[in-house]
Image: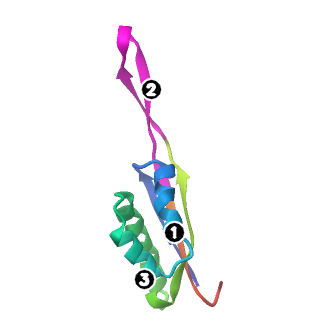
Amino acid sequence: MEAKAKARYVRVSPRKARTVIDLIRGKDVIRAREILQFNERNISEVIEKCLNSAVANAERDGVKAENLFVKTIFADEGPTMKRFRPRAKGSASRIRKRTSHITVIVATREEA
């Protein structure tokens, strides 16, 4: 049994999100929650919310959270907001404010 959850347009670059995502890939849901809870990065809260949503989606089908593990988790690049900052001699430089789409898929151990 698989369940999926997405967090879209998260205001963090995918590169920063992947540092935390790599910590919980393949772990049990209980252990993944502990890792995210004690991680100091701000993106950990968003990833934990997305993980809890995927677990809740699985529990709607009668699966217990203890039997689930993080099968797949990844951060894709979302749209980039372009902003400009003034520079010397009347010029300007571009600032790229990146966003990401985080996807979490949890599954039971028997499927894997």
Q: Is residue 85 magenta?
A: yes
Magenta segment: 80-101
**Residue, x 47% and y 56% (percent of image)?**
17
Query: Which residue corresponds to the image point at 50% horizontal and 71% vertical from the top-left?
Result: 24
Residue kind at label 3, given as amino acid type: Ile
Q: Residue furthest top?
A: 89
Q: How would you rate the neighbour count of disc 2 (Cα within 10 Å): few for under 14, some for 14-19, many for 20 or more?
A: few
Secondary structure under tag 3 reads: helix
Query: With 21 as the anchor, is 37 left or right in this view?
Result: left
In the rendered image of this protein, does residue 75 appear above or below residue 87?
A: below
Amino acid identity at mark 2: Arg
The quadrant holding residue 25 is: bottom right
3D distance between C-alphas at marks 1 and 2: 32 Å
Q: CA distance from mark 3 to mark 2?
A: 42 Å
**Magenta stretch, main secondary structure class:** strand
Q: Check contact, mark 1 vs mark 3: CB within 8 A.
A: no
In the structure shown, which secondary structural element does the residue marked by tag 2 occupy? strand
Q: Are marks 1 and 2 in contact (CB under 8 Å)?
A: no
- The type of residue carrying mark 1 is Val
Task: Tell me the residue that label 3 is attached to.
Answer: 30
Q: Earlier in the sequence, mark 1 or mark 2?
A: 2
Q: Position of residue 47 (x, y in %)?
A: 42, 65
Check disc 3: other Cα within 10 Å, few if <14, some if 14-19, many if 20+. some
Residue sitting farthest toward the right: 112
Give the residue pinned by disc 2. Answer: 94
Residue in the image at 51% along x and 90% along y: 67
User: What number is the disc on residue 92?
Assistant: none
Q: Is residue 70 above or below residue 66?
A: above
> Which is nearer the N-term, disc 1 or disc 3?
3
Left or right of 42? Residue 26 is right
Residue 112, position in %: x, y? 65, 84
Which residue in the protein does label 1 denote? 104
